[in-house]
Amino acid sequence: MVTAPKILLLVPAVVLLVATGVAQGKLPTGDKKQSADALHGAPFVNAMAWGIADGKTGEFLWGHQEDKTLPMASTTKVMTALVVLDLASKDESVLAETVTVSRFAANTGGSSAKIRQGDRIKVGELLYGLLLPSGNDAANALAEHFGRRFRPPPVNKPVPWTPRSAGRAPAWANFVAEMNRRAKQLKMTKTRYVNPHGLDSQYQHSSVREILRLSKVAMENPDFRKRVRTRRYKSSVIDGTGSRRQVEWTNTNRLLDIEGYIGLKTGTTPRAGCCLVAGAARGDDNLLLVVLNSTNRQGRYVDSRNLFRWAFRQRVAGGK
């Protein structure tokens, strides 16, 4: 593995001190400049951790702090979708099942698919609501619907109760337990799920390397690939009175507005910062990328585009 130069983090107080020194034409006594920036290696980015893998083989290629345990926000929903699609791969009728939205799911905070208590919607449609607008309500609705098909969590490893999970169906915890079982199958030893949506919890975490591993597996599923590369999608929902209404979902992944990017998943919370899992293709080459804890929403896209551009150049030059 080739490790890129460490990311430079500038503390505001230090920036102010240096700026003051420059304005006066001198630096504080005893302070020395750092070494000049190297002319080789990956671009400097503001994300705390990042990594790039081969999209076809899953081989990890480059990264920074790729094994650091960090919160991952709504990139969690890659696993949520995979658990559902694993069932659908064994029985296609799963996607035609109807989910009835509970009060608990409808009242989930954060990003929303705009579904309401009593709404009825097909699983295949609701997966778009999960992955495009990053619907936390959709994640909870799917977990409650499918949880009864999975074993409960181990007695010695219960899914922690949090205020956000108050009112959940008993089977909801079974679904989260299945997410963790699937992570174990994928040897994701740094990953733990305590909810299906990624809203902040001190117990929920993963790493860049393990999210890349998960994403490679998810992208092997054609139903997953189709959804995460979709920019906009309209669906029909039947409400509790039997009336039908249209909902339209827009993908939160702004890279899809640019040719060559093939989807995956955004995530943003106060603890996790701005995160992104992305795929890109140039000719026959295909790369997957994860950035965790970028400083702002736009910054994660700048980071990702710079890293992708650098990585594809390395590939052309034979650097992996």
Image: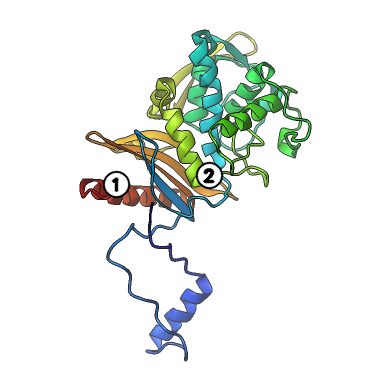
Coordinates of residue 208 in the picture (x, y in percent): 49, 46
Colour mapping used in the image = rainbow
The one nearer the camera, 43 or 285, is 285
Tell me what residue is drawn at x 49 percent, y 10 percent: 92
Coordinates of residue 142 in the picture (x, y in percent): 60, 22
Q: Nearer the viewer, mark 2 or mark 1?
A: 1
Q: Is residue 276 left or right of residue 84?
A: left
Decide: marks 2, 1 in contact (CB < 8 A)?
no
Secondary structure beneath label 2: strand
Spatial CA span between label 2 and label 1? 31 Å
Q: Is residue 102 left or right of residue 41?
A: right
Binning the other alpha carbons within 10 Å of mark 1 as few (below 14), some (14 to 19) or many (20 upward) gives some
Instruction: Answer yes or no: is residue 251 visible.
Output: no
Residue type at the position of mark 2: Thr
Residue type at the position of mark 1: Lys
Q: Which mark is residue 268?
A: 2
The residue beneath circle 1 is 320
Secondary structure beneath label 1: loop
Coordinates of residue 265 in the picture (x, y in percent): 46, 36
The one nearer the camera, 254 or 156, is 156
